[in-house]
Image (cartoon, helix red, strand yellow):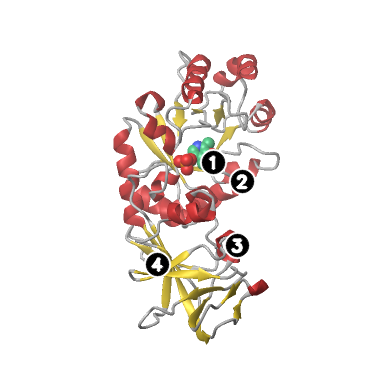
Amino acid sequence: MARGILTIDLDAVTRNWTALSRMADCETAAVVKADGYGTGATHVALALARAGARSFFVALAHEGAALRQAIGAGPAIHVLSGHMAGDGAILRDHDLIPMLTGPDQVARHLATMPGHHFGVQLDTGMNRLGLKEAEWQALSSEVLAQKPVLALMHLACADEPDHPMNTRQLAVFHRMTDGLGLRRTAAATGGILLGKAYHFDMVRAGIGLFGAAPFKAGEPVVTLSLPIIQVRNVTRDEAVGYSCGWVAPGNHRIATLAAGYADGIFRSLSGKATLWAGDSPCPLIGRVSMDLITVDVTHLPEVPERLDLIGPHQTADALAAVAGTIGYEILTALGPRYERRYIGGKAGASA
Ligand SMILES: *Cc1c(COP(=O)(O)O)cnc(C)c1O
C-alpha cells in the first residue's frame, strides 16, 4: 500500500489533557477545530469525552455539526465563528453554542434565535474577534438579560510569558466582566501555562493536547511514516527531481516516497528535511513535489519499507523549525490522503 501512515496516540492526547487540567482548578475544555489539528476531531473528542471532557470548541458551525453527530448529546460544543448568517438551522439542529463575535451577531442571534444558548467573545486588544469595550458597554445589559453561558477572551501573546500584552489584556477582561456573574474563559494552551490568574472558570486546550509548543512538557502524539515506492541508483552528475534540484556527487541510492506537498510536506522543506530509518537519519534531497519526495538512502545497509518524517527523532515542532513555521501549521496541514491509525482511546479503528 502506497499511503503514508499517520499514527495518533489517543492515550497520549488524554494524558496531555489530564496534565493541563491539573494545572488549572477549573474546567478544561478541548479545542478540536481544523479536524482536531489534523489528527481527527471525532476520534480525539470521543477519547477525551471518555476521559471526562465536557466542553469542546470548533471554529465553524459545520465542524460542530459533525462533532455532535460523532459524540452525541451531552457535551457542550462551542462555535468560535459565532452565529453567521445562515447558521441558524445548523446551530439549532445540533445544539451548538455560538460564541458571538460582535454587535451584528448579537443582534442576529437575539432576534432570530431567542432562548437558544450562546456565549459572547470580548475583544481585550487582539482585534480579531469580539465586542470591543465600548460595544460591550452599550450592549451588556441587553446581552446579560439573555443569560450568556460564557464570556471568552483570547490572548495575543500567551506564548511569550513576559510580554506586557498579557497583563494588559487580563486587566481589560477584568474591567469588562468583573461583578457581572458571568462564567469566564481567557486561556488557551499558552494561557494555561501563564498561571492561575488567567484560568477563570474554564481553560481551552488546543495545541497542548498534541504535546506541541508552547506545551513543551507534553507528550508527542503523532507519528508519520511514509512508504518507499521505488529505489534507484544514480551515478555522479545525474540529477534528481524538478529543476534538477539535486545533482549526485557520486554513486548514490535514492528512495522515492509517496507523499508530497499535497499531503502537508511543505515545499520549503526541499533539500532541508531529514527522514529516519529507525535511528538512522536520511536526508531529503531535491525538490518536494506534489505526491513524491526523494531521499538519500545510500548509507543504509538495508532499505526499509517506510521512513519516518515525524516520530521519536523528530517532533512536529522540530520539523516546523526546519520549515520555518510552527507545530500548529505542520499538524493542521497533515493531508487527507494518509491512513490514520489510532492507538488507545478505545477507538481502535483506522480511517
Ligand atoms: C485556536 C483557539 C484556541 C486553542 O488554542 P491553542 O493555542 O491551540 O491551545 C483557544 N481559543 C481560541 C479562541 C482559539 O481560536
Residue placed at 54% from the left, 85% from the top?
A: 235
Indicate the amino acid at tag 3: Arg
Is residue 278 visible in the rendered image? The answer is: yes
- What residue sits 33% from the left and 51% below the top? 219
Badge 4: residue crowd in 10 Å (few <14, some 14–19, many ≥20): few
User: What distance separates the C-alpha of mark 4 from that of mark 3?
Assistant: 31 Å
Residue 96 is situated, as x and y percent measured from the top left of the image, at: 54, 41
Circle on res. 326: none
What amino acid does circle 2 point to?
Ile
> Which residue matches tag 2?
90
Label 3 near label 4: C-beta < 8 Å? no
Q: Is mark 1 in CB contact (under 8 Å) with mark 2?
A: yes
Give the mark, 3 or 1, whose residue is nearer the N terminus.
Answer: 1
Query: Which residue lies under the disc numbered 1?
Result: 96
Mark 1 or 4, nearer chain start = 1
Which label belongs to residue 349? Answer: 4
Residue under circle 3?
A: 267
How far apart are the alpha carbons under marks 1 and 2?
8 Å
Is 250 rendered above or below residue 62? below
Q: Is residue 127 left or right of residue 351?
A: right
- Look at discs 2 and 3 and give the one toward the viewer: 3
Q: Amino acid at mark 4?
A: Ala
Comes first in the chain, label 1 or label 2: 2
From the image, state whether disc 1 or disc 4 is nearer to you: 4
Task: Classify mark 3: helix, strand or loop.
Answer: helix
Residue ID at (56%, 28%): 120
Q: Amino acid at mark 1?
A: Leu
